[in-house]
Image (tube, grey):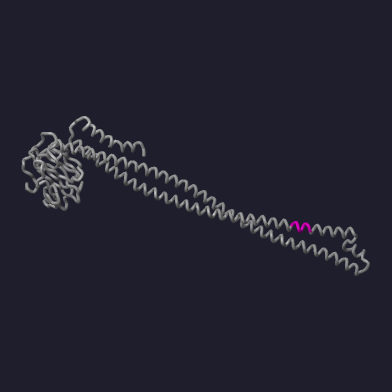
Amino acid sequence: MSERKLNGFWKPAAAVMLTLALLFGTGMSVSAESLLELQERQVALEEQKEDNDAKLEKLKEDTAQKKGYRDTLYQQIETVQSQLDLYRQQIDRLNKQIAEAEDAIAEKQAGIDKNVELLRERVKAIYMSGQSPAIEIVLSSKNIMDYADRLEMLKSISASDQELINSLKEQMSSVEDELVLINSDKSELNKSKKALERKSAELNALYEEAQQLVAEAENEEATVLAGSEILGSQIAENEEAIAQLEEQLRQDGIGSGSLGNIGSGGLSGTGSFLWPMPGYTYLTCYFGEGGHRGIDIAGGDIYGKAIVAADGGTVQYAGWNDSYGYCVFLDHGNGYQTRYAHMSELGTVTGASVAQNEVIGYVGSTGNSTGPHLHFEVIYQDSLTDPMGYY
């Protein structure tokens, strides 16, 4: 996470601590304005955490995909490696066959050379003995029968040696042909092996790249997770600050369940209430039903419609309040207070003076709400009363 983002996470927490220090550490009085600041900050923190958590989920999916890609590459590398091992074994076997064939060729060649040498020795012996072929055999023969016998003996010796030599040559030729085939097979295997080695190198490079991407994704995921944890801590601290301020406001106000009358002055109520939702009278929940604190006013197209002050008075509080969502609390200065909840938008601010029938907000469905409506309460002398008792 960048330093800028970290600063963004810590600033709300620092603001919370500063607010608490100003409120409690210095003995200054608390106010609805201070509470509003904390509540607005709470909304911002929750929205930021929600965005951060959504980013975290996407990062987790991205990391999982990158790990899957990396693992697939690893499996491919193992497959290629197995093929390379097989090729190496086959090449080793061919090299052994080549060596054996070369030895056989050398052996055959040695046999040929030996028999050629023997033939030379025989011819030399014949020559040295004066028994030379052709004319010498004729001249030296005693008679025609002697000539025929000598010539036949010479042919027999020559034919025998030549037959042996030819046999050795045929065997050597066969071995040489076999050697050519083995070398051809080896050449093809070497080509395939080199192609696989190139593929192996490519896969290894891709694997290293994928591993780096996984590491980066895991680091980013860890950073965002840390951000969510920081935001969670800030939200918890802010909630505690809100609870403390609300408790202080109750202690300084007019009793439990109220934020009290903040300040003095402003408009006083007439003691007579106007209907807060002009044009809409349908009630979806009555006072006291299931512990309900007021009445719920609804309608088919009520969302966004204007809410008016039932009587003149001072805005105790205008802002966010957990289950109420966006809400406005009015103090009418005569023992009466009214509350308006679940607004989509505020139409006034804390501390403002409002006249009877003045627009103070717009219908929404914020906070603990199941649909667009106005939740309306009437409090008299710190006690909840049935709003319908005033109409």
Using residue 61 as the reference point, say whether residue 297 is left or right of it.
Answer: left
**What secondary structure do most residues of the magenta stretch adopt?**
helix
Q: Is residue 91 above or below residue 336?
A: below
Q: Which residue is at the far bottom? A: 145
Residue 320 among magenta residues: no
Q: Quadrant of residue 161?
A: bottom right
Using residue 233 as the reference point, say whether residue 150 is left or right of it.
Answer: right
Residue at left offset 45%, top offset 51%: 71
Q: Which of the image's four quarters has the N terminus?
A: top left
The part of the chain drawn in magenta is 109-114
Residue at left offset 40%, top offset 50%: 65
Q: Is residue 153 above or below residue 306?
A: below
x, y percent for residue 348:
16, 40
Q: Count the marks: how many?
A: 0
Q: Which residue is at the far right? A: 142
Q: Which residue is at the far top? A: 26
Is 186 in front, or is 249? 249
x, y percent for residue 248:
18, 36
Q: Quadrant of residue 356?
A: top left
Using residue 101 as the reference point, say whether residue 285 is left or right of it.
Answer: left
